Amino acid sequence: MQEAFMEGENMLTRSELVSCMELGKVLTSELHSEQLFGRILQKVSELLPAENWSMLLLDEETGELYFELSVGLDLGQVRDVRLGLGQGVAGKVAQAQKPMVIRDVQECDFFCKEVDQMTGFITRSIVCVPLVFGGKTLGVIEVVNARNLKGKPLQILLLIADYAAIAVENMRRYREIQNLVIHDDLTGLYNTRYLYKVLKDLVAGAEAGVDPFSIIFMDIDNFKHVVDTYGHLKGSQAISEIAGTIQECLTEPCFGVAYGGDEFVVVLQGFSRNQAIEKAEEIRSRMKQTVYLSNHGHRLSLRASFGIATFPDDALNVTTLLASADRAMFDIKEKGKDAVKSA
């Protein structure tokens, strides 16, 4: 059963309006997710006491809702739950971009029991509002088993949701800008700005007794011939595909860097020299197994030369570390290419 609380007698009091406006000022100026969601949690808990409440955000790639934050539920238990648009109360609200108050879920034909079954929680009532910005659904806020469904739960939640939607969109745009600042446009790998920042931190950590680390400096062999044969656009596509090969071989906290042109750096946190050699051989082997530019009707085989340096064994600062790996790589170039050498 669906009802909307919009009657005149349920207008917000002055103190409630002031409280929501103060929240709005705070939310719309917050760009970091932990602080942002924590403030939303606090304010909803104050204004709408309930057994639990959750924020579900929309994954733009899959079109599914996922639990970003939950109070009263173990987030670990519901982290993998996905609701399609139109599925359950949250999915209906997200799809229609209209709020719902379900006084008794037993009378709701589309109530989804999956979360209750997973957690053992018993849902009796739901107040759910959409997070909408610029006509686009960002997610929903659900208040479950509110202590009092009489009065103004929907008006309060709608006002909070308006501010929360602006805050979530601001946060997403901030993340996108941050992502662009530290990533290479062509390959999606990190850029040199990020590389030097992280290497400085790793050097400081290693000096303080944290595990050593290694880097791989790699250069694509005979790449000028690729550009001369296939052109610059397909050469750029080949670089992008090689970046994909590198990514396939790495797991966090290790990462790849587009160093420039046909050169790459791989940062291997916690890797010894021998481990770094093994990883370089893995990338080298994966490249040999990969056919590049196949989507363009070509069957291009590519090879690379790899130089490895380990901190602090081969260098005591970032500049010397990169130079050591670079020299090792050029030694390979001079002796026949397509091989791995440690500094």
Image (cartoon, rainbow, N blue to C red):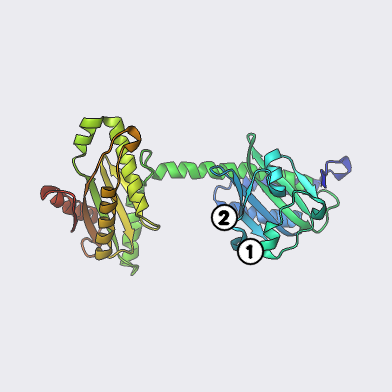
Drawn side of residue 322 relative to residue 169, left or right: left
Q: Is residue 51 above or below residue 217?
A: below
Q: Residue at x 72, y 63 (%)?
A: 121
Q: Secondary structure at mark 2?
A: helix
**Which residue is label 2 attached to?**
34
Drawn side of residue 7 relative to residue 277, left or right: right
Quadrant the C terminus occupies = bottom left
Q: Residue at x 32, y 65 (%)?
A: 206
> Residue 249: which numbered mark, if any?
none
Q: Amino acid at mark 1?
A: Asp
| Label 2: few (<14), some (14–19) or many (≥20) C-alpha neighbours in 10 Å | few
Could you say which is closer to the camera, residue 203 or residue 239?
239
Mark 1 or 2: in front is 1
**Which residue is label 1 attached to?**
74
Q: Amino acid at mark 2?
A: Glu
Could you say which is closer to the camera, residue 215 or residue 304?
304
The answer to whether residue 326 shows anywhere in this view is yes
